[in-house]
C-alpha cells in the first residue's frame, strides 16, 4: 500500500509543475496584448501618453499577480 502512495505523490508533484507551466501561458499572452495595444494607442494618440502608460502598468500588474498566484498554488496543496 505504501508503494502506491509513494507513486501517486511523485505524479502529483510533477503535475503541479506542468500545471504551473501551462498556467504561465495566460499571463504571458496578456502582457503581450497589453503592451502591443498600448503601443498602437500611443501611435494613434501621442497626447494621451500619460493615461495610456498608467493603464498599461495597471494591466501589467494584474497579469503578473495572476502569474504569481499560479506559482504559489502548486505549493498550497
Image: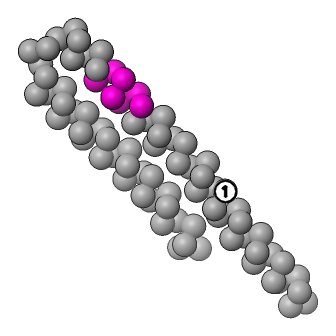
Mark 1 — residue?
18
Label 1 neighbour load within 10 Å: few <14, some 14-19, many 20+? few
What is the magenta range? 32-38
Residue 33 image point, x, y percent: 41, 28
Q: Quadrant of residue 5?
A: bottom right
Q: Quadrant of residue 75?
A: bottom right
Residue 2 image point, x, y percent: 86, 90
- The residue at 42%/58% (across/down) is 68
Instruction: Classify the position of the C terminus by image quarter.
Output: bottom right
Asked which secondary structure carries label 1, the reply is helix
- The residue at 53%/73% (across/down) is 76
**Above or below, comparing residue 2 to residue 75 in the picture:** below
Majority secondary structure of the magenta segment? helix
Q: Could you say which is closer to the camera, residue 54 or residue 77?
A: 54
Q: Quadrant of residue 16?
A: bottom right
> Can residue 28 be found in the magenta stretch?
no
- The residue at 49%/61% (across/down) is 71
Residue 51 image point, x, y percent: 13, 27
Q: Is residue 4 left or right of 10 when viewed as pictured? A: right
Label tally? 1
**Above or below, comparing residue 56 to residue 14 in the picture:** above
Q: Is residue 50 left or right of 36 when viewed as pictured? A: left
Amino acid at each position: 500500500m505504501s508503494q502506491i502512495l509513494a507513486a501517486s505523490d511523485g505524479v502529483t508533484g510533477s503535475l503541479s509543475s506542468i500545471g504551473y507551466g501551462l498556467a504561465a501561458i495566460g499571463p504571458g499572452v496578456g502582457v503581450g496584448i497589453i503592451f502591443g495595444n498600448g503601443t498602437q494607442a500611443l501611435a494613434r494618440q501621442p497626447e494621451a501618453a500619460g493615461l495610456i502608460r498608467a493603464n498599461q502598468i495597471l494591466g501589467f500588474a494584474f497579469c503578473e499577480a495572476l502569474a504569481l498566484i499560479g506559482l504559489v498554488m502548486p505549493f498550497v496543496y
